[in-house]
């Protein structure tokens, strides 16, 4: 490529720069970064956030920050040091704390969002007229531009992971946000309608599947997900992930959200997975157990409650050194968006 070689016309390019700028034009300059590289070069860094460091910070947030109307939540953002904002270049992950008796007021926005419940039980979420309980290990979806609010009437703080495709939305210049005049939106006559229609995962209303802008299923319970994962443990393992399943849209069979994929993974005792690399980014949350992820030769030791993001196109592999304890990881990635654009690429062992 011309930009990867020494520019023979470097002086001419510099001389043109000022004249072209008057007409809002430019040519590639000798000191410009290359437009193309042989392999992806990302500013996203591999980061491990340890629960032992996060827990006291979340306690401070619960004590010092208020939950205000208008959409502002009490969240601790997982900020990637290689980026100006965001956990990866396509999504933001943050940890939300909600205290007994609080209501996170209703709003809606372009960004797709979901919650994975980390600690606690008994909160409820209302999403576009449907209300569901949120308990530890559940996955709760909030597709873009759907009204949503949360309420908690328990006794101790609840904590969950929030992930939104904000960075991708901002890159597309597609930001819309609207607060509600009502603290909570009204609940429909059948508050769990979509779950009644599609929640079995096996059966749904007869006839041609409806053409929907989003996944109609809003909640995936821990019990269902863990049961499916344990059944999958009786199958041939994935060489790079051991036992892994994806949360899916029951109507299309595709990923649960159009821009983000969610997966649940089990690495069994003594398993050392094969290395691989791919475009796109992902974040892991350690649901249980402990293990190691080696990224470009550097080992990262993780345990329950930790978070880890892996730099795009970094060679990485997982291992579980325990003799008797399974490790379970929840994963969010941007593979659906990358695949829809034709940019996803992966290298696995032959």
Image: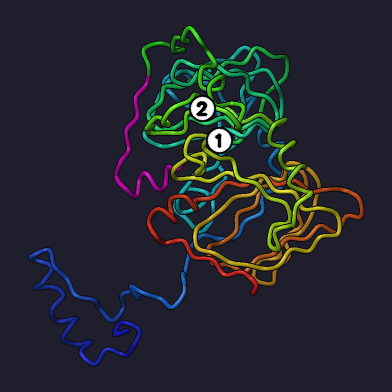
In which quadrant will I find the C terminus? bottom right
Residue 104 seen in this snapshot: no
Is residue 51 placed above or below 10 in the rendered structure?
A: above
Measured as percent of width and height from the top left, residue 227 is found at 74, 36
Q: Crowding at label 2, few (<14), some or many (≥20) Cα neighbours within 10 Å?
A: some
- State which mark lies toward you, 2 or 1: 1
What range is drawn magenta here? 165-179
Front in this rendered view, residue 62 or 80:
80
* Picture residue at 62% right of the left edge, 16% below the top: 152
Quarter of the image for residue 221 reads top right
Numbered tag placed on residue 162 in the rendering: 1
* Picture residue at 31% right of the left edge, 78% below the top: 31
**From mark 2 to mark 1, how far is it between C-alphas?**
10 Å
Q: Is residue 241 left or right of residue 44?
A: right
Q: Is residue 282 magenta?
A: no
Total numbered labels placed on residues in the image: 2
Is residue 71 placed above or below 268 in the rendered structure?
A: above
Quarter of the image for residue 3 reads bottom left
Residue furthest toward the front?
Answer: 207
Q: Is residue 340 left or right of residue 198?
A: left
Residue marked by disc 2:
73
Residue 125 seen in this snapshot: yes
Of labels 2 and 1, earlier in sequence is 2
Numbered tag placed on residue 300 in the rendering: none
Snapshot colouring: rainbow
């Amino acid at each position: 490529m011309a930009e990867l070689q020494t520019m023979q016309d470097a002086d001419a390019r510099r001389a043109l720069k000022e004249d072209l700028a008057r007409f809002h034009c430019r040519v590639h300059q000798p000191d410009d970064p290359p437009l193309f590289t042989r392999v992806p070069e990302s500013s996203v860094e591999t980061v491990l956030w340890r629960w032992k460091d996060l827990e006291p910070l979340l306690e401070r947030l619960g004590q010092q920050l208020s939950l205000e109307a208008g959409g502002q939540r009490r969240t601790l953002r997982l900020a990637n040091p290689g980026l100006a904002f965001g956990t990866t270049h396509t999504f933001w992950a943050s940890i939300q704390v909600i205290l007994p008796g609080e209501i996170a007021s209703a709003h809606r926005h372009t960004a797709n969002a979901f919650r994975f419940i980390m600690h606690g039980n008994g909160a409820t979420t209302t999403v576009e007229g449907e209300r569901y309980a949120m308990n530890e290990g559940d996955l709760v979806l909030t597709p873009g531009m759907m009204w949503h609010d949360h309420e908690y009437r328990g006794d101790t703080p609840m904590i969950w992971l929030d992930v939104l495709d904000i960075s991708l939305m901002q890159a597309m210049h597609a930001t819309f946000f609207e607060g509600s005049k009502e603290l909570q939106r009204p609940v429909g006559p059948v508050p769990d309608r979509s779950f009644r229609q599609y929640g079995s995962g096996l059966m749904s209303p007869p006839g041609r599947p409806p053409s929907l802008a989003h996944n109609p299923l809003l909640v995936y319970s821990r019990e269902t997900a863990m049961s499916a994962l344990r059944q999958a443990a009786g199958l041939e393992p994935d060489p790079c992930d051991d036992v892994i399943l994806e949360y899916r849209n029951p109507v299309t069979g595709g990923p649960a959200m159009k821009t983000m994929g969610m997966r649940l993974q089990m690495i069994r005792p003594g398993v050392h997975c094969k290395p691989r690399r791919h475009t796109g980014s992902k974040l892991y949350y350690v649901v249980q157990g402990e293990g190691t992820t080696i990224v470009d030769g550097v080992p990262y030791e993780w345990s329950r409650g930790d978070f880890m993001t892996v730099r795009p196109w970094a060679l990485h592999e997982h291992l579980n050194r325990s003799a008797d304890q399974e490790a379970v990881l929840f994963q969010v990635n941007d593979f659906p968006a990358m695949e829809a654009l034709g940019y996803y690429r992966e290298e696995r062992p032959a």
